[in-house]
Image (cartoon, rainbow, N blue to C red):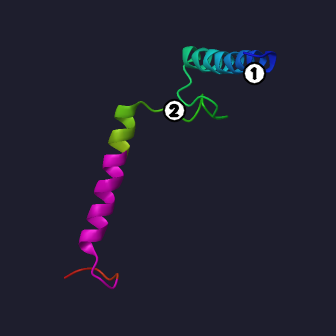
Amino acid sequence: MNLATVIASLALIIIVGLALWYIIKEKKKGNKCVGCPYAGECCKYSSKELDEIAAEISAGIAAENASASCCGHAGK
């Protein structure tokens, strides 16, 4: 191994180590979306609450589609 290979290997190890350190630090703070500028705010709902909200939206869309005909007017 020559000196250039050693230096490149050390630089790569340092970069990967710093990236892992940053990810671990952010996860300990509770940020679910590491690197996102809104990481502390965008995950304000738990996954159960998000599932309930999605179910409500899906039910509303299904009910709306069931009452409409192909041309957009109310069904029979």
| Residue 31 point in image, percent of width and height | 56, 24
Secondary structure, magenta segment, majority class: helix
**Amino acid type shown at disc 1:** Ala
Rate crowding at label 1 as few (under 14), some (14 to 19) or many (20 or more) other CA atoms within 10 Å: few
Q: Amino acid at mark 2?
A: Cys
Element class at badge 1: helix
Q: Residue at x 56, y 14 (%)?
A: 28
Q: Which residue is drawn at the image coordinates 34% and 40% (left, top)? A: 51
Residue 38 placement: quadrant: top right
The residue under the point 67% across, 34% down is 37
Q: Residues within 10 Å of mark 2 (few under 14, many from 20)?
A: some
Magenta run includes residue 76: no
Q: Quick one: 24 or 9, which is closer to the camera?
A: 9
User: Which is nearer the eye, 55 or 28?
Assistant: 28
Mark 2 or mark 1, which is nearer the start of the sequence?
1
Looking at the rendered image, the quarter that the N terminus falls into is top right
- Secondary element at image label 2: loop
Question: What residue lies at 56% left-to-right and 31% top-to-bottom?
Answer: 33
* Residue 11 against residue 54 in the figure, above or below: above
Q: How far, Cα to Cα, is label 1 from label 2? A: 38 Å
Question: Tag on residue 43?
Answer: 2
Q: Which of 35/72 is in front?
A: 35
Q: Are marks 1 and 2 in contact (CB under 8 Å)?
A: no
Look at mark 1 in the image and give the residue it sits on: 8
Q: Which residues are magenta?
A: 54-71
Q: Position of residue 58 (x, y in %)?
A: 32, 55
Residue 69 among those drawn in magenta: yes
Q: Pick out the residue farthest to the left.
A: 76
The C terminus - image quarter:
bottom left
Observer-side mark, 1 or 2, equals: 1
